[in-house]
Amino acid sequence: MRCVLLGAAFLLAAPAQAELLARFTDAAPADRLTLSHAGGCPLQDTVVTIELAPAGLILDVTGSGAGVAVFQPLVVERGADRLAAAPDPRDGDTSLRLSVARLAAGDEIAMTLDLDEAASATPTRVSGAEMAGAVLRIGDGEAVFDTNGEARLALVDCIS
């Protein structure tokens, strides 16, 4: 019984770990990217980067430039007040940087945008599976998007 109580006390005293979930959904007319804070202490004054190059993807946010056919500007639909600045990607960018002011447990940032494959027979259609290999990064921590278009990043420096 004493060991069980000691174990429970240790678990309660351990720092809470935060997790950031990024989810990409292919849709028409615009794709959707959602960042959700899945628990633990808040993210504050943090840059979240999504590296698209490892998946062979680019941003197609204007009618001219690197994208193909249909384009969509990046629009933050939910959680704009959680950003320190509005994202301003350029057409053809291979990464997306988001300056997060504060994102607490349960909060999310949702945006629409258009991603194209850099080299493909069907460059205007990007599915969650094609997002596989893209990287979600905060500082030195990173998580790779899976074939479902999701990446989960444990935030190890989080103490509540």
Image (cartoon, helix red, strand yellow):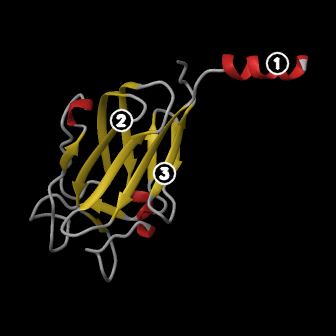
Please state which amino acid type lies under the numbered disc 1. Leu
Quadrant of the snapshot with the N terminus: top right
Give the total of numbered labels: 3
Query: Residue at horizontal 31%, vertical 68%?
Result: 118
Label 3: which residue? 151
Label 2: which residue? 107
- Residue 10 located left or right of residue 103: right
- In terms of sequence position, does the residue under pointer 1 or pointer 2 come before the other? 1
Label 1: which residue? 5
Above or below — where is 112 with respect to 26? Answer: above
Please state which amino acid type lies under the numbered disc 3. Ala
Query: Residue at horizontal 18%, vertical 43%?
Result: 88
Please state which amino acid type lies under the numbered disc 2. Asp
Q: Which of the two discs, 3 and 2, sits closer to the camera?
A: 2
Q: For numbered disc 1, what is the local secondary structure?
A: helix
Query: Residue at horizontal 15%, vertical 65%?
Result: 71
* Closer to us: 148 or 73: 148
Above or below — where is 78 with respect to 130? Answer: above
Q: Quadrant of residue 93?
A: bottom left
Residue 6 is situated, as x and y percent measured from the top left of the image, at 82, 17
- In terms of sequence position, does the residue under pointer 3 or pointer 1 come before the other? 1
Q: For numbered disc 3, what is the local secondary structure?
A: strand
- Residue that sits furthest to the left in the current view: 63
